[in-house]
Amino acid sequence: MTDEDLDRLLRHATPVIGADRIERVSRAVLLRQARLETAAASWFTWLTARASAAYCALFVLGCVVNVALHQGAAARPDLLAAVTLPSGWGG
Amino acid sequence: MTRVAQGNAVAFEMLVRRHMRRALAIAQGITGSGGDADEIAQEAFMRVWQHAGRWDAGRARFTTWLHRIVVNLSLDRRRRPALVPLEGAEELPEEGELPPEAIARRQERLAVAAAMTGIPDRQRAAVTLFYFEDFSGREAAGIMGISTGAFEQLLARARRAIKAALADKITRG
């Protein structure tokens, strides 16, 4: 076998890849990519929902503490008077 | 590719459809298995999607980057013990449905495929890129991440081994 024969054989030995197979594998890739995006989007939604819930809980807690402090101050003005605030803090 | 890096799914679909045939052909040429080639091509494109931001246009062409991923995944797959025979990877109709020239070509392809099973993986990769996919020596060397001289040596060794295997097959009849 000459070098030219070998070159010719190798040049014609390219694997045959059918159009339907290209289409099938391409679709599989695009499906995986879409799933990946959906998973990322749902993770973001989950995180946003948790962050919103935490913010609401802190807001409500702040309101409760605020009301409690006001009620406490009204009930025991003597205690409030005993508290010495630094200058510029009001009171 | 810039649009793919920005998360553009339509641009990614165009990229996949444009480069899928060659990715499959390279993976199949190296692994010798259609099933492995399908998985490797899928994995390669998923890596492109996930790491598109890492691609640097100044360092390498997109095709060089993609084909390097395919070659590396194929070589990794070949390190696994199971090897599907190359004959099983052909996608052709039965010989009775083919004209004589097509049958002769198919037999030549199978003979080359059989000869390639006996050569080292990197030599298979060199033959696949240079002969099957028609890359220049410089392009193929870039994809494999070696110098042009090293690639030429690799290809010369592959040619010698394939020639010897084919001659042996002819001698045995």
Image: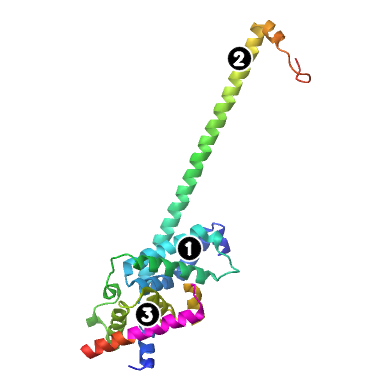
Mark 2 falls within which chain? Answer: A
Q: Quadrant of the C terminus of chain B?
A: bottom left
Label 3: state its secondary structure: loop
| B2 left or right of A42 in image | right
- The answer to whether residue B146 of the structure is visible from this angle is yes
Q: Whole-Å distance between the Cαs marked 2 and 3?
A: 81 Å
Label 2: state its secondary structure: helix
Give the residue type that dot 3 points to. Thr
Q: Are marks 2 and 1 on the same chain?
A: no
Q: Are marks 2 and 1 in contact (CB under 8 Å)?
A: no
Residue A79 image point, x, y percent: 67, 8
Q: Earlier in the sequence, mark 2 or mark 3?
A: 3
Residue B166 is a magenta residue: no
Q: Nearer the observer, disc 1 or disc 3?
A: 3
Q: Where is mark 1, residue-wise? A: B13
Q: Whole-Å distance between the Cαs marked 2 and 1?
A: 60 Å
Q: Where is mark 2, residue-wise? A: A68
- The answer to whether residue A24 of the structure is visible from this angle is no
Which circle marks residue A14 in the picture? Answer: 3
Query: What is the span of residues highlighted in magenta in the rendered image?
Result: B145-162
Q: Nearer the observer, disc 2 or disc 1?
A: 2
Label 3 packing within 10 angstroms: few (<14), some (14-19), many (20+): many
Nearer the observer, B134 or A26: B134
Residue drawn at the location 49% of the way across and 82% of the way down: B149
Q: Which is the main secondary structure of the residues drawn in magenta?
A: helix
Give the residue type that dot 1 points to. Glu
Q: How is the image coloured?
A: rainbow
Q: Quadrant of the N terminus of chain B?
A: bottom right
Give the residue type that dot 2 points to. Ala
